[in-house]
Amino acid sequence: MSTILPKEPVITDRESVILSNAERRNLRRKFKSSIVATRAILNPRNQLERLVERKTTQVKQVAEDTVQIAKNNAPVIGIIGVSALLFAARGPISHWISRLRKRKTLTPDGN
């Protein structure tokens, strides 16, 4: 019983050298391109640009989250804001009320 198997191609020494040179050139090209890519990644300017881009994205995300939280809690934030305003203005408000009381007591009819 005989099987039909492809015979191994006969490669001469010259063809072997040509193939090995082609393979070497291909590997050298890949190596040089990987070196160029590595240099681009490790370049301080590019690293700084990537860092700024990442941080900008993070800041935008935090700002969007903060706006969403503020929208969801608007009444509470408003109450806190008014409370803080009244607390800060308690002296002038108290002074104004005292002045009104004094003016009312100084009127001749007492109304």
Image: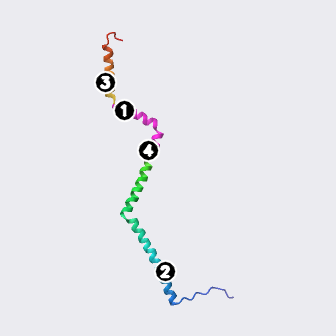
What's under tag 1, amino acid-wise? Leu
Which residue is drawn at the image coordinates 38% and 65% (left, top)?
A: 42
Q: CA distance from mark 3 to mark 4?
A: 38 Å
* Among the two numbered marks 1 and 2 on one chain, the one whose residue lies closer to the N terminus: 2
**Who's the residue at 39% across and 32% down the image?**
83
What residue do we see at 42% from left, 68% from top? 37
Q: Alpha-carbon distance for marks 1 and 3? A: 16 Å
Inspect the image, locate mark 3, and give the three-letter code of the amino acid beneath it: His
Rate crowding at label 1 as few (under 14), some (14 to 19) or many (20 or more) other CA atoms within 10 Å: few
Earlier in the chain: of badge 1 and badge 3, it is 1
The boundaries of the magenta stretch are 63-88
Most frequent secondary structure within the magenta stretch: helix
Residue labelled with disc 3: 95
Residue where numbered disc 2 is placed: 23
Amino acid type for the residue under numbered disc 4: Thr
Residue bearing the label numbered 4: 66
Packing grade of label 4 (10 A; few <14, some 14-19, many >=20) is few
Badge 3 element: helix
Residue, disc 1: 85
Question: Residue 12: where, in percent of width, then height?
Answer: 53, 90
Q: CA distance from mark 4 to mark 1?
A: 22 Å
